[in-house]
Amino acid sequence: MWAYEKRLQYPVKITKTCPKTAQLIISQYGGPDGELSASLRYLSQRYSMPLKEVGGLLTDIGTEELGHMEIICAMVYQLTKDLPMQKIKESGFDLYYVDHTTALWPQAAAGLPFCATELQSKGDAICDLTENLAAEQKARVVYDNLLREIQDPEVREPLKFLRAREIVHFQRFGEALERTKDKLDSNNFYYFNAEFDKSLFHKEEKQCCSKNSQTQ
């Protein structure tokens, strides 16, 4: 259960429309390293996380990513609000306009639609947390690229805030990974169901050793 607060985590007040900028920024809505994929990734992974506190962290960050998605959507909306047709055609925004008018639809900057294959949930704590570290760095690089291209300060300030949050999330996931490593031992380090997997693999190891001794 979530309680929705009717304000953005960071204010967005863009006074000049720019569909070209909107086409770039929308990648952080539905692109491969965007906020939508991050939110779905973390909110899915939390269920199989063996440590309760790490599952709570995934819930917190996954929820915050929903708020970041809202910031991106607000930026795209304000950058394309009440666009005249001439500006739509001149900017190349007409390809998007044909299918979606100026409504929000998750896609990458190159026009590829959002796809769930862009995120992963493995049920292995080490694997999932390592993926999350990479995801935060990839998102940070996208924000770096956007800030290199965009000069409008009204657009840059929310992007700078979002970039900073990617760095914080990377740090939190790094701490969570180390905490998880400390809790897991050599018998369950890579196991989803430690008791089941340990007994299963030990049984297979014994069978393998038995076969090897027979052949010798």
Image (cartoon, helix red, strand yellow):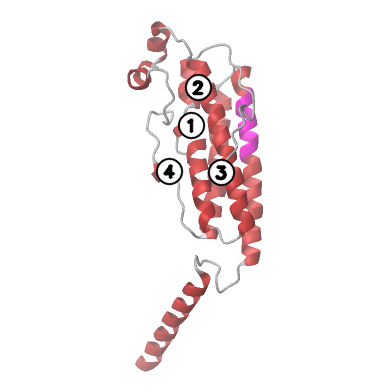
Describe the element under mark 3 as helix, strand or loop.
loop
**Relative vertical location of residue 205 with respect to residue 137 in this rendering, above or below:** below
Query: Magenta stretch: residue 130 in it?
Result: no
* Residue in the picture at 53% in, 27% down: 72
Q: Name the residue under label 3.
A: 1
Instruction: Report whether residue 122 is seen.
Output: yes
Classify residue 2 by image quadrant.
top right
The mark that comes first in sequence, 2 or 4, is: 2
The mark that comes first in sequence, 3 or 2, is: 3
Q: Which mark is residue 118?
A: 4
- Give the spatial CA distance, label 3 vs label 2: 28 Å
Q: Which amino acid does label 1 sit on?
A: Tyr
- Give the spatial CA distance, label 3 vs label 1: 23 Å
Q: Do labels 2 and 1 touch, CB within 8 Å?
A: yes
Q: Mark 2 points at which residue?
A: 76
Q: Do labels 4 and 1 touch, CB within 8 Å?
A: no
In the image, the segment drawn in magenta is 157-166
Q: Mark 1 points at which residue?
A: 29
* Residue in the picture at 48% in, 58% down: 123
Q: What residue type is labelled 2?
A: Val
- Give the spatial CA distance, label 2 vs label 4: 22 Å
Q: Whole-percent x and y of residue 198? A: 50, 75
**Nearer to us in this view, 202 or 137:** 202
